[in-house]
Amino acid sequence: MYVPREVESVLFTREQLGARIEQIGDELTAEYADKNPLFLCILRGAAIFFSDLVRAVKCPLEIDFIRAHSYSGTKSTGNVEVDLMNIGDISGRDVVIVEDICDSGRSLAEINRALSECNPRSLKTVCLLDKPSRRAVEFDPDLTGFVIDDLFVVGFGFDCDGKFRNLPYVGVYSGN
């Protein structure tokens, strides 16, 4: 297995990630079996998790994409930019927001605020990772893959300045 020198350790293996994503997929299948939900991927970090997750959901669904950005390198800027990318009319829809990580909570709180203004029937947030120790605003995801300590992670869609997204695991970034 390729582990770049900047990765201090592997936090979650491909197998651990796959097993947890299947469990989340089963939960979402049971909840949305007869509802045709819209799954929204927050680009770019959630793309790999999103792809695996929607394949783990065994009921009809639709997909679309939005952007939110607040990081520069390993630090959050504190400012959240949300681009709904012309997702169309979501009023009366069941919407599942899929994000890679809930850190400060700012991005997800802002995305939820923006989408709530579009009058969906329901909004649910699913995150692969949750870092509750870093919360700057009151926000908790509805479903979480794993809760982690205050670590900067890369791989499986997580990056540092665009690098390491393609690693098939989640690793702790050392920067060395």
Image: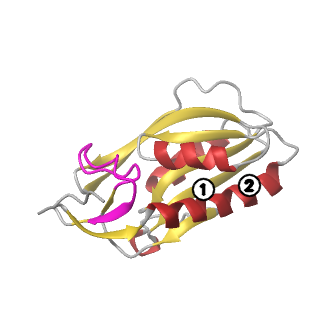
Q: CA distance from mark 2 to mark 1?
A: 10 Å
Does 20 sit above or below residue 60?
below
Residue 2 placement: quadrant: bottom left
Magenta residue check for 132 = no
Q: Name the residue rendered at 81%, 49% in the picture.
A: 32
Does 50 sit above or below residue 118?
below
Per the image, label 1 sits on a secondary structure element best described as: strand
Locate residue 75, reporting x and y percent: 25, 57
Residue linked to disc 2: 28
Locate residue 4, reporting x and y percent: 20, 58
2 and 1 marks in contact (CB < 8 Å) = yes
Per the image, label 2 sits on a secondary structure element best described as: helix
Residue 86 placement: quadrant: top right
Give the extent of the magenta segment: 155-172
Amino acid found under the numbered disc labelled 1: Val
Q: Is any part of residue 165 visible from this angle?
A: yes
Does 78 sit above or below residue 176?
above
Amino acid found under the numbered disc labelled 2: Leu
Disc 1 residue crowd, few under 14, some 14–19, many 20+, Cα 10 Å: many
Magenta residue check for 167 = yes
Q: Is any part of residue 140 visible from this angle?
A: no
Sequence-first disc among 2 and 1: 2
Disc 2 residue crowd, few under 14, some 14–19, many 20+, Cα 10 Å: many
Q: Quadrant of the C terminus?
A: bottom left
Q: Is residue 143 left or right of residue 154?
A: right
Residue linked to disc 1: 126
Locate residue 174, reporting x and y percent: 19, 66
Nearer-the-camera pick, 32 or 118: 32
Q: Is residue 142 left or right of residue 169?
A: right
